Amino acid sequence: MRITSKGRYGLKAMMELARTGDDETLLKTREIAENQSIPLKYLEQIINILKKHNLVTSVRGSDGGYRLARTAAEITVYEILNALEGDLSVVDKDDPSWGHEQGVFWQDLENRIRRILEVPLSDFTEANREAEQGLMYYI
């Protein structure tokens, strides 16, 4: 399993939306792109995928923008990455060369990875915020 820039940027965009902390605040793609250093055109493609998977909603108009479709506590990192990256399996389950003995190991590994990624977006965002605050720069 490899997480591409689409997955990383999508996760950053979702964290930016989660930081608003309410259901009313709308963010424009331009704001998200600037705040998270994501190329605007690429972000627009990512947002469309997230919208298609019911992770974000949009409001049209001059005061429009995007917000989370559910609370950040109800959306998981796994959902976001699965929407953007597709199947997150570590092996091709249709490959008949995987024997039962090996299959048990790979299935266990996949279950462990999924449990790690099932963290709520709210927790993930908070952990990142705390990590950023803990960084000190010296010149």
Image (tube, rainbow, N blue to C red):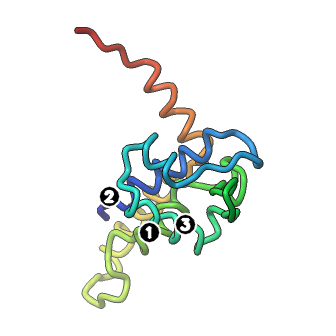
Residue 102 image position (x, y, % from top left) = 30, 73
Residue 104 image position (x, y, % from top left) = 39, 71
For the point 47% across and 52% down, the residue is 11
Going from the N terminus, do you reach mark 1 or mark 3 first?
Answer: 1
Quickly name the residue at label 2: 5
Pick whichever, 80 or 92, lies toward us: 80
Q: Marks 2/1: CA distance?
A: 12 Å
32 on left or right of 24: left
Quickly name the residue at label 3: 50
53 on left or right of 61: left
Going from the N terminus, do you reach mark 2 or mark 1 first?
Answer: 2
Q: Are marks 2 and 1 in contact (CB under 8 Å)?
A: no
Q: Marks 3/2: CA distance?
A: 15 Å
Q: What residue type is labelled 2?
A: Ser
Image quarter (top left, top right, bottom left or bottom right) of the C terminus: top left
Q: Residues within 10 Å of mark 1 (few under 14, many from 20)?
A: few
Q: In this view, does 15 lie above or below 50?
A: above
Image quarter (top left, top right, bottom left or bottom right) of the N terminus: bottom left
Q: Residues within 10 Å of mark 3 (few under 14, many from 20)?
A: many
Mark 3 element type: helix
2 or 1: mark nearer the eye: 1
For the point 37% across and 82% down, the residue is 93
Quickly name the residue at label 1: 45
Going from the N terminus, do you reach mark 3 or mark 2 first?
Answer: 2
